[in-house]
Amino acid sequence: MKCFGLNAYYKACVACVACVACIAYTVKRPYECLSRMPWDQRVNSGSELKDLATRHRFLSEQNSSDDFFSLAVRAGTDKVQSNDDPAGHHYHNAYQKYLSPLRHTKIKFLEIGLGCDMHYGPGKSAKLWSELFKHPSTEIWEAEVNVACASKWNETMKNRILTGNQAEEATLRNWITTTGGEFDIIIDDGGHTYSQQLTSLRVLFESGLKAGGIYFMEDLVSNVLPGYNDFPDVPVDKISNWAKTLMLAERLSESEQKFLEIANLQSIECFRGMCAFHKCPQSRAGSQCP
């Protein structure tokens, strides 16, 4: 790639306060300096930067250490794949889209799975959420089946720790009562058995998630792994059927639409290894989105 001339690039750097170091580097190696800068588009040789302020904002965002991926790597969670964890997931595609914009917004958040059975130890994602969500009134709750492990995190989590088996409806309804429900975001990163995934989605989506909220189900790859099939219904098959029903809803009879089984399900959006379930902005008990 050809870099534009020294004078044009020097002027661009001078116009940008954050580029002081870039100016110094330009004096020494002008063309390498430009090639090191990850702009979405680079100008041709001899031309001026177009809309420098916009490009600088883009550069700042791209290099920000507070994007979801960077925060997840620093927290040590397996929600992203990195050099430290090549076996990690790719959930940043969903969470950068939906969670990062809530960074400075007051929300109520629940994650199932403190990570007590993870090889890297518990609390990694809890650390991630505390770094991601910065509003002082945001509530972050964690649910965990390992009571002994979870109890050690009460102080760190400001006593916002829930315990019990997510496959049991009574446990889930107790969580809703304890917390008051009305969660903006719920993430299921729990045990990943069929019964746990489907029961948690059915109960918490309808009764624990507020209108307009999003429910994320992680680790759907468990549906093709041994040791998780404790239930006749396979979550990925159910999700596929629900998505089909949503797509064909305008032609289905009222009885067929009830096949959705989950009231107020507005849409399903799937990413690599996970799906997001969006709740209707205006929800009514037992009904579907208008």
Image (spheres, rainbow, N blue to C red):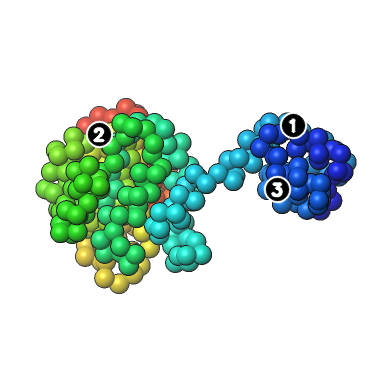
Camera-nearest label, 2 or 1:
1
Residue identifier under label 1: 15
Judge from the rendering whether residue 8 lies leftward or rightward of residue 70; answer left or right.
right
Q: Quadrant of the C terminus?
A: top left
Q: CA distance from mark 2 to mark 3?
A: 44 Å
State the mark number for residue 182: 2
Tag 3 and tag 1, C-beta contact below 8 Å: no
Q: Secondary structure at mark 1?
A: loop
Estimate the x, y position of residue 185 in percent, counting from the top left: 33, 40
Quadrant assignment, res 104: top left
Q: Which three-letter amino acid code belongs to the residue tagged 1?
A: Ala
Tag 2: Cα neighbours inside 10 Å, few (<14), some, or many (≥20)?
A: some
Q: Residue at x 29, y 48 (%)?
A: 111
Q: Residue at x 59, y 46 (%)?
A: 63
Judge from the rendering whether residue 28 lies leftward or rightward of residue 250; answer left or right.
right
Tag 1: Cα neighbours inside 10 Å, few (<14), some, or many (≥20)?
A: few
Tag 2 and tag 3, C-beta contact below 8 Å: no
Judge from the rendering whether residue 281 lies leftward or rightward of residue 85; answer left or right.
left
Camera-nearest label, 3 or 1:
1
Estimate the x, y position of residue 234 in percent, counting from the top left: 29, 60
Q: Which three-letter amino acid code belongs to the residue tagged 3?
A: Met
Q: Secondary structure at mark 2?
A: loop
Judge from the rendering whether residue 249 lies leftward or rightward of residue 141; answer left or right.
right
Tag 3: Cα neighbours inside 10 Å, few (<14), some, or many (≥20)?
A: few
Asked whether the viewer can see residue 272, the reply is no
Residue identifier under label 3: 37
